Image (cartoon, rainbow, N blue to C red):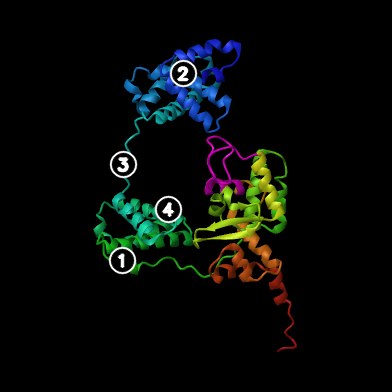
Amino acid sequence: MFKQLFKSAKSAFAVVRHETAPYAFERRQFLEHCAKRGYSRSWLTRTASTLLRVVHELKDYPDLKVTEDDIQAASLRTTRRGGVFRKITGVQEFRKVFVAVAKSWLRFLGRFQEPDIAPAPFADLLDDFVKWMHVDRGLSPATVRNRRWHVGCFLRWFSEQKRPILSLCLADVDAYQAFCSARNLSRISIKIHTNAVRAFLRHAGRKKWCSASIADAIQGPCIYAEEEVPWGPSWAEIRRLVSSLGTEKPVHIRDRAIIMLFAVYGLRVSEVARLRLEDIDWEHDQIVVRRYKQRHSQPYPLLPVVGNAIVHYLSAIRPACGHRELFITLLAPRKPMSPSTLYQVVAGRMKILGMNSLPHHGPHSLRHACAAHLLSEGFTLKEIGDHLGHTSPSSTRIYTKVDLAGLREVAAFDLGGVL
């Protein structure tokens, strides 16, 4: 590995230095592991040089069993010795790189002593609730994950009251809602928190952890049906967004395919994140979207413009890796793009184009734009709901509020001959 990184004739001494330093086998293993994950040669060379400094500072620790404090002390010692490398990058930057590389290497070897983390408040109760949601209720992973997070926030807040869970009462839930409101959470966000807490307390009541009557008495903020208008960019702005990604830059090729899937099919961010290579049926020109909410798959015709964008990404950009997900990070370590990463891709592109007048950015705004465009093209609410994967007509009805052209026709209608 060292001979591959240091190939020039002048690097012969560097190869010897790396191979004769302590823990050469362990360092070589780590570098080979990183190379398989797609890290560049320049990154591997810099990391190999940093590791050389790491092992010289940590070689006296038995079996390299070190803690965070030990690594910080080692980074301080090596910067005090000076050196050209430290002068070029700066002391603070060098220490940051030193610590990061040391921790990654030691974690790879299984020798880093992770700091003790205090258990989360009422962790056993939360784990039991999560198991019940997953096993007994069969809820989707996204629902389980979201409820776990919201209930965890509530339990951390309640733990500060220094009282047992058995003493929890309705006034505590009211106080928690006031706490959320004081943090400027919207009514919808507070409602989501409240729904998760209600589900937990209903489970807690069955388990006799607290009074069973609390859950039924909980009331959240009043949310009026269709009180908000779904705001998204206009279709002209969607075209401008796609056109801005017309270069041959790798990131543009990938982002163009991603944004087309959101805008043309109105997919949810989790649905794009879960798309796999086998979901593209090239023989029948179809793309299959797995609707985890509805527990079924939905085929869509693969439009030529979208198919060409995906083909271009697959043939020119997508890294070779063992993952079957369609969209992979371009930078190492190679891994599937998460929903949060996809959100940043879309929101970042929208902000670059100055779409700052929208109240919300990100993939869901493109879903709204897709629905509004279909409505303006004359599609029925049933057809739009089927396209978006809605199970209830009420989920689609809200888009009638953005049909401004239709509203203007109603406003201009002459009732003189009727009245």
Q: In front here: 248 or 88? A: 248
Task: Bin the neighbour count of mark 2 within 10 Å (Cα to Cα): few under 14, some 14-19, many 20 and up.
Answer: some
Quarter-of-image position of residue 210: bottom left
User: Which residue position holds label 4?
Assistant: 145
Viewer-nearest residue: 78 or 179: 78
Q: Nearer the viewer, mark 1 or mark 4?
A: 4
Q: Which residue is mark 1?
A: 214
Q: Nearer the viewer, mark 2 or mark 3?
A: 2
Q: CA distance from mark 2 to mark 1?
A: 60 Å
Residue lying at the far front in this picture: please name it.
283
Q: Mark 1 to mark 4: distance in Å?
A: 23 Å
Say what secondary structure mark 1 lies in.
Answer: helix
State the CA–CA distance, disc 4 to disc 2: 41 Å
Find residue 62 and report its image quarter. Answer: top left
Per the rendered image, the range of residues in magenta is: 317-346
- Badge number at residue 118: 3
Element type at marker 3?
A: loop
User: Residue flagged by tag 3: what amino acid is it?
Assistant: Ala
Please give the label number shown on residue 52. 2
What's the amino acid at mark 2?
A: Leu
Side of 246 where 213 appears, left or right: left
Up/down of 313 relative to 362, above or below: above
Q: Nearer the viewer, mark 2 or mark 1?
A: 2
Residue 324's spot in the image, x, y percent? 54, 45
